[in-house]
Amino acid sequence: MKYQFNDEILGSLFAFTDDIKRDENQFKINSGNISILWNRNNKSVEIQVDELTIQLLPNQLMTTTYLQHISFDKTDLSLTAFLFNREFYCISDHDSEVSCNGILFFGAQNLPIVTIPKDQERKFTNLYEVFEDEFATPDKIQGDMLQMLLKRLIIMCTRLAKDQLIVKNLDNEQIDVVRKFNVLVDTHYKTKRKVSDYADLLYKSPKTLSNLFARYNQKSPQQIILERLALEAKRLIRFTDKQNQEIAYELGFNDPAHFSSFFKKMTNLSPTQYRESLAISV
């Protein structure tokens, strides 16, 4: 089962499939998409995201964006997926409505995976069925209806993420600072490397940010910034043909030697050693 809504004038896409491995290359637009992956099986499903192997458990959902490299080569069961691009639903434009940016999408930290509680399984299944019904009723307002349903799905997932992934003693204002920091790091990591840079953008002191993240998790703001930079370096080495010097300049390093030193500090391997280790593992 595969459905898609496509507005060729706007270049927008919303797609819905019960088997993303089978259908991932069958949509009219295959780049720049954001996805919500849902394991509706009774067994776990394996997914490769960048260089991580993720075991998505039954009734768990995970979000991915076009910044990540996802592979379903080792996925042996069907996996439900909702896909959309910014022309269909722009996360940043609608963030004031759904408050998901930096929690579900474009966060600089770990992959967001949420578990559907037993008492909410029926609610998610009902929404799944409403998506199916809507695709069976094509008319002039179908795009608007699908956008409303997607918004509802994002809100439901965001509520779970806030409950399951964020320390419960943080208030809404503190959660908002965490979200905005994550988005800012994803946006500016190539040019802004200091906590003070982000503190200025958030109208907070560096100490306030550090204290907040000490309560939020074990990573400091500085560690998050550097890990985001290292992640992009690994992506460029792994998934492009760019040489180390090109990657260094793309990531804002004026000296390739400085980039090499940074990369080795973060990964215990030089860029060349990392590249060679990838070749060996293929």
Image (cartoon, rainbow, N blue to C red):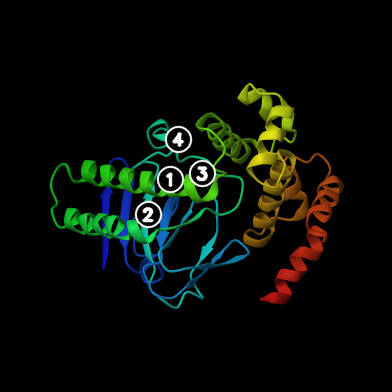
The residue at which mark 3 appears reads as 103
* Label pair 3/2, CB-CB below 8 angstroms: no
Which is nearer the N-term, disc 3 or disc 2?
Answer: 2
Three-letter amino acid code of the residue under disc 2: Leu
Q: CA distance from mark 4 to mark 1?
A: 14 Å
The residue at which mark 1 appears reads as 158
Which is nearer the N-term, disc 2 or disc 1?
Answer: 2
Which is nearer the N-term, disc 4 or disc 3?
Answer: 4
Which is nearer the N-term, disc 2 or disc 4?
Answer: 2
* Label pair 1/3, CB-CB below 8 angstroms: yes
* Label pair 2/1, CB-CB below 8 angstroms: no
Q: Tell me the residue at 57%/44% (across/down).
A: 167
Q: CA distance from mark 2 to mark 1?
A: 16 Å
Q: Nearer the viewer, mark 4 or mark 3?
A: 3
Residue 190 higher or lower than 110, as above or below: above
Residue nearer the viewer, 263 or 251: 263
Three-letter amino acid code of the residue under disc 4: Ser
Number of other residues with Cα within 10 Å of mark 2, as a class: few under 14, some 14 to 19, many 20 or more: many
Residue 92, label in figure: 4
Three-letter amino acid code of the residue under disc 1: Thr
Q: Tell me the residue at 63%/42% (across/down).
A: 216
Residue 173, label in figure: none
Q: State the SS at label 1.
A: helix
